[in-house]
Image (cartoon, rainbow, N blue to C red):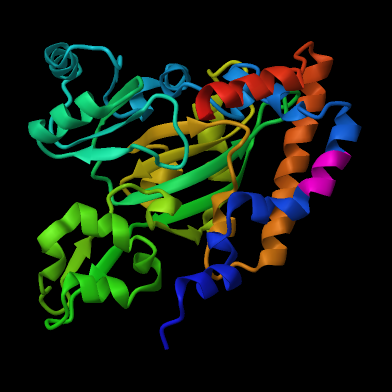
Amino acid sequence: MKFPLSIIKIFNYEYWPWWVFYLPMAPYWLYLSLKTRSLTFFTAVNPGIEAGGFYGEKKMEILKNINPKYLPKTTFIHQNQEYEKAISLLNTSQIMLPFIAKPNIGERGTNVAKIESWEQFKAYHAATQEDYIVQEFITYPLEFGVLFSRLPNQQQGKVSSLTMKEFLTVVGDGKSTIRELIENSTRARFQLEVLESKLGEGMNEILPKDEKRLLEPIGNHCRGTKFINANHLINSKLDDIFSRIAENFDGFYYGRFDMKVASIEDLYRGENIRIMELNGVSSDPGHIYDPDYRLWNAYRDLRWHWKRSAEISIQNRKRGFLPLPFGEIWAIVQKHLL
């Protein structure tokens, strides 16, 4: 039986609006605010990132603090840059098609695109209203979100959430069109309107039996990516690897690395890793959005992570790093949202 999407949203919290999901956590946030003596305690968690990475942080500024051997080829392009100059910057950085373009300041996959032709890039460049970055497209098969934190008074940090990303894909049966395959997939149905615009007449293609077709190459939950709880892969080796990756980033103590890796073995060796982004204190433990995860356990894990950020904030405050006033936080939100 095919349930309406509105019903699916009610009974699957991964599809709830963010404010509905977080509303039950409000009393705990108030408790932590009292404990830390600040409503904005979270802004002191990462002194090396604007507002701790709560909102409006610049991706390029963060990436500059990560060892280049872990990064894809990346370049920054100003919104008013001439197209020919943008092409020159890509050539200088040795970035070839296909590649990823995304806003330097952005949330939840907004305006992120895989560019597969120079015509697409020219259109993207002309349409953008903000500074953006371009990264080489990494073909490693595994993509993870790795939530890492470290107390300021400790050398060793901890990986507390490992999320594997499964991209939005349909599998042919030899008789159904791509549209029909999408309509028979709960997750893909949420993306139907976007996919219609993207694929056009391609929606009527009939896929051969067992052929897999990738519908969305961007690993973001709001674009149909399935988040899978991979916490069983967390061990001391992973703690060591990300402690080393983060050690040269002065003022970073809590955040999520969005990255690709060639294999699990390489992940444990710290090899063939490419970090596309590092998000700050607003990072979710992505594993809680696994469709098979229980809501109560999700709130339990979220509570642990909020407590962890409060502990970091308290230690940083003792070291002289004060939370931002609420007025400054509101100004940041207004600048980038309103």
x and y, in percent, of residue 75 in the image: 28, 19
The quadrant in which residue 212 appears is: bottom left
Residue at image point 68% right, 17% down? 328
| Residue 241 visible here | yes
Count of labels shown?
0
* x then y, percent, for residue 37: 89, 26
**Toward the viewer: 264 or 204?**
204
x and y percentages locating residue 243 in the rendered image: 57, 31
Nearer the observer, 63 or 216 = 216
Query: Would you say the magenta stretch is mainly helix, strand or loop?
Result: helix
147, above or below 190, in the image? above
| Residue drawn 33% across the image and 57% down it | 167
Residue at horizontal 66 percent and vertical 55 percent from the top:
20
Q: Is residue 82 above or below residue 74?
A: above
Tell me: 162 left or right of 305. left
Q: Which residue sits at x=69%, y=24%? A: 43
Direction bottom: furthest residue: 1
Left/right of residue 295 with respect to residue 26 in the rendered view: left
Q: Position of residue 4 (x, y in %)?
A: 46, 77
The foreground one among 127 and 99 is 127
Above or below residue 144? Residue 85 is above
Q: Can see residue 252?
A: no
Boundaries of the magenta span: 26-31
Q: Quadrant of the N terminus?
A: bottom left
Specify the quadrant of the image occupied by residue 59: top left
Q: Does 272 lie within the magenta span?
A: no
Q: Is residue 12 left or right of residue 132?
A: right
Residue 106 vs residue 34: left or right? left
